Image: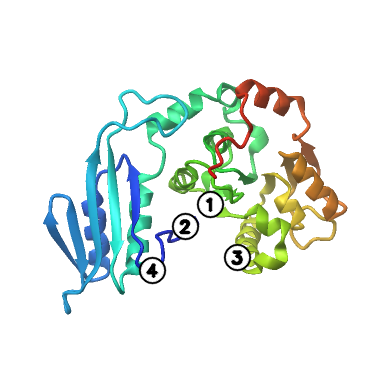
Amino acid sequence: MTTTATAPAGDQWTVLRGPVTGETATATALAARHHLACEHEDSGRLRLTDPVTSHTLVTVRWMSLPPQAPRALGFQVPPSAAVDILIDPHPGGHRLAAELHDALAARLLPYTGSELDGIRAAMPLLEHYRRPNPAFNNWALLFRDHYLEHSTGFVLAMERAGIPAEWIFTLDKGDRTWNRDRVHATFLAHGYRSDVLDNSAVNDPDAHQAQLARAGAEIDAFLDAAHAAGRRVLAVDDGGLLARGYGALGAPRTVDAALELTVSGIKRIAAAGPLAIPVLNLARSQVKSRLVTARSPTPACAGCAP
């Protein structure tokens, strides 16, 4: 599984919000791993300090919230309890704050069981076809798209259809979609790999060499492991992976089949040259046009934040 320390750098604080309990135990466990003191100042605040110098490295504050509006498809009745957690790094405590942020996020951000039930209920077609299917035996999934609730429902359905969690690798396209952090955390909680392959990097590789090298190493390792285990790899994408050469004739590594989601992806694939694999063009299919039109009158990227 892939995760990153996402707490802001420098002396900025960050706030996490969600239906979490055990924030005190999480901070205490982290302090113990680093041989730090965990000082409880009151019922809603604690400090992680250096026991030798008494220097405060991180202050954590939290407070309970009233019932919150739904954060996923469908209403949750009764709504989950929620808490705001503020992580405040002091000088020398920035890496510790980032580690605490990720530890708390792993507990706080994944969709709850009732939220996942709401996502499934909103996607009845997937629920109809999510039964175990021998056609998925010995396949692995490389999924790249917007991190939205619909993506969550699709990937979870692919697992229930027969692709084991350890053979699912999801990639965020990099858009600032609403709840993208929750989708990432949910994928990690289910045992998938989760990372980012930004569209801007695919479209301008010279300006994003470091990001592409890191993501490429993760993808290469996944493909090598899947093929070594006798699994074929299905890519569900918008052309970014195939534009990077993972379907090209003569490439050192390729996926074994691809399902293309967007017209822009079709253009990327066409520009990448001859293919060595079959690609299903879902971008111009009746399935996509009818489902997207029926789902909502708003654009498909309505979930994208400014």
Dot 3 and dot 4 residues touching (CB under 8 Å): no
Q: What SS does tag 3 mark? A: helix
Residue 231: give x, y in percent of width and height.
66, 49
| Mark 2 vs mark 4, CA separation in Å | 20 Å
Residue 217 can be seen in this image: yes
Contact between marks 2 and 4 (CB within 8 A): the answer is no
Badge 3 or badge 4: first in the primary sequence:
4
Q: Which amino acid, by three-letter code, is at mark 4?
A: Gly
In what element is the residue under mark 1? strand
* Distance (Cα) linking label 3 and label 1: 13 Å
Looking at the image, which residue sits at the far right?
A: 274
The residue shown at (66%, 27%) is 292
- The mark that comes first in sequence, 3 or 2, is 2
Q: Which mark is residue 3?
A: 2
User: Quick one: SS at disc 4?
Assistant: loop
* Residue 66, quarter of picture: top left
**Residue position marked by numbered label 4 in the rendering:** 10
Asked whether, in this view, residue 277 is left or right of residue 175, the answer is right
Q: Residues within 10 Å of mark 4 (few under 14, many from 20)?
A: few
Three-letter code for the amino acid on which mark 3 is drawn: Arg
Q: Which of the two labelled residues, at mark 3 and mark 1, occupies the earlier sequence position?
A: 1
Q: Residues within 10 Å of mark 2 (few under 14, many from 20)?
A: few
Please name the amino acid that badge 1 sits on: Ser
Q: Is residue 227 visible?
A: no
The answer to whether 5 appears left or right of 237 in the picture is left
* Mark 1 vs 2: CB contact within 8 A: yes
Residue 86 percent across, percent down from the top left:
29, 53
Q: Which residue is mark 1?
A: 194
Q: Which residue is mark 3?
A: 214
